[in-house]
Each structure stands twice: as structure tokens, then as C-alpha cells.
Amino acid sequence: MTAIATGHVLSREWRLVHYLNGQPNDTDVELVTVEVDEPDPGFVRVENEVMSVEPYMRGRMSSRSTYADPYVLGEAMRAPAIGRVTASSSVEIPVGATVLHDFGWREHALVPETACTVVHGQASVSALHLGLLGIPGMTAWVGVRRIAQLKSGDVVFVSSAAGAVGSTVVQIAKALGCTVIGSAGSKDKVALVRELGADAAFDYHDGSVGTLLRGALAELGAPGLDAYFDNVGGDHLEAAIRVLNDHARVALCGMISIYSAESPQPGPSNLIKLVWRRARMEGFLLRDHRDARPEFEADMREWLHVGAVRAVETAVPGGIEGAWAGFLGMLDGTGTGKTIVPL
């Protein structure tokens, strides 16, 4: 039987005030209070329990063209979230159901039932759907399996290896039998990367990335890289290209080093190495690989079951008020692993 709650609820939501050019700051957004009404037919009202902040959101805060449409000024921003249905006009999704959707950045949301995925378990378990079973986990899987095509014995370098995607790549690569090198932005993060299974890791603040990467290869007795999973771009990408083996693969996932740049940044100066090494460099977007979800989930659930992969999360305090600070911290590397905002 369809359950319907009556009356509206008050909710706070984050809105973009103007489009960004350069580093984001507190004047770019506002936290406002709104009334959220009863759901119309085909909708449910959700009280969000935890939301995700992701690097791709920075691109949606700019008016320039990227692969995702910009946020609409003066409207609530969007983000993956897990929440509990508090009012429903849907037969399929009753009051009390826990759902995954894309209407985060707010405490309560009216969500089309077609945009909801029912998930099971407590909030801590459901939060896996924002991380290892969500965008970061599947991004890592696609980059490893389909783009870099890692196989046992490969030597792979992972940049931003303590981040949401990078930390997952490290663990997947080890589960596949690879030798893994990771870069991170602090000694604590380097220690985490090693704890996750990396055979070598370095803090990129300790010198030139090229020198540090060569040192890691020497430590492992490896002549070069069979694959590079790029989350950073810039000096990391140039350093990796310099030490590629023949027929190496480079998976271009993100380039966080340039997301807030105010002017175009120069690319690697050594792309000719790709020709000499007959190497392949390929960018990818998760939306082009939706067909991979059943295979991805089968792999990830098995790795979780046997303990080959574990969640790495930073929970941002402060509820909805802390969401913007959590986003900024995710961009500047304050947290480790997947940044989530419990609401």
C-alpha cells in the first residue's frame, strides 16, 4: 500500500551564487532554508543521511564547458546521497526505504522515483554505495580493468593514491597481482598507501616527482612502468611518461592539479615518448561504461568479502553546514580516501 506523509518540512540547502574562476571560496555559495512539500505522483521525499563530495563537482561550478552541465545558479546543487524516504506517492518505494540518489547538498529532497535506487543496510553500510560501490569504486575498476588493462606482474604507478579513486586503484591492482607505486601529499598518507598494499610510495612534496618515481622504481628493481593511473596530471603525468615501458598503458582519470587553474596549463613536454614506447594513453568517463556495473559489482563484492579491498573514508563533521568545508578539504587534499558528509 502506498504510504503518504502530510505537510511540508524545512530544509537547508547549498546553492551556487556565481560561477567560479580559480580557487573556490566561501563567498561563492550560500546556505539557505526552504520548505520541501509533499511529493507529487511519481516522487518521494527523502531525508538525506549522508552525502558525497566529488572532484567533478568543481567543473560543474564553472560556466565553461566540461563533460557535465554547470550547476544552475540560485538552485540547490546536486550530489550523490543516501537517505530515508519520509513521504511517498510511489508504490515501489515506501516510506522508510533507504535510497541512493543524486539530490544531495540538502537535508531533504523531492526525488523522482525513477532517480532512486533502493539500498539495504544501516547508514554505515549504505555509505559504501557512495564509495567502493559508487562513483569512486567503479571509476577505479573501469580505469584498471578496461583502460589500463592491468594484469598480474604489471608495475603500475598511481597518483593521488590516498584519494577516493586512487586508494581503491591501489587495492584493486594488488588484488590482481601487480606491483604498485603510489604518490600522496603527506607522510601520513604515504603510510596509508603502504598499508593498503603499495610496494613503494612517496610524498610528492619531498622533491621532483620524476626523481622520486625513479627512486621508487630502483627500490623495487623495476626498469619502468607498465601502466600509470593518472588522477593529477601536470608533473606526475610527465614523470610517468618518462619511465614507461614498451606498450605501456596510461589511464587518464582526472587532473586535479589544474581544476582551479585560472589560465591554461602546459601539458607534458615529452609526449614523443608515447611514440617511442608504442604506448597508449586514454581518457575515460564513467558514464560511457554503465554496462560494466554487473561485472564491477561482482568483483568488488568478492574483494570486500575476502578482505582484499576496504573502505577508506573521511567523515566531515557539522552536518549540512560542514558540507562546503568538506568539499574544499577534498579539493586541497585535507582528507583521505572518500570524503563523505553525514547529515
Image (cartoon, rainbow, N blue to C red):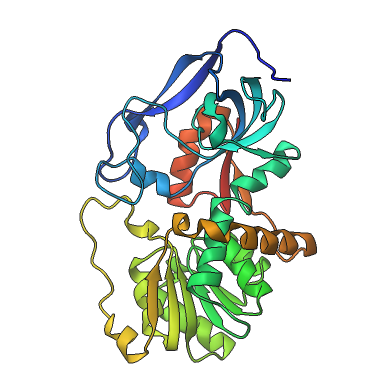
Q: Is residue 202 visible?
A: no
Q: Is residue 160 above or below residue 74?
A: below
Q: Quadrant of the C terminus?
A: top right
Residue 157 in view: yes
Residue 317 lies, in percent from the top left, at 59, 34
- Write the residue at 58% across / 42% down: 340
- Please tell me in which quadrant of the rendered image residue 52 appears: top right
**Residue 126 location (% of width, % of height):** 69, 42
Front in this rendered view, residue 114 or 214: 114
Q: Is residue 28 found left or right of 84 in the rendered image? A: left
- Residue most toward the top? 7
Q: Position of residue 162 (x, y in %)?
A: 55, 60
Q: Position of residue 180 (x, y in %)?
A: 58, 76
Q: Is residue 83 left or right of residue 258?
A: right
The residue at the point 43 percent across, 75 percent down is 250
Is 325 on the left or on the right of 28, as rendered?
A: right
Quarter of the picture containing the N terminus is: top right
Numbered circles on residues, count: 0
User: Quick one: which residue is furthest to the left in this view?
Assistant: 263
Q: Is residue 62 above or below residue 305?
A: above
Judging depth in this view, the residue of 322 and 300 nearest the camera is 300
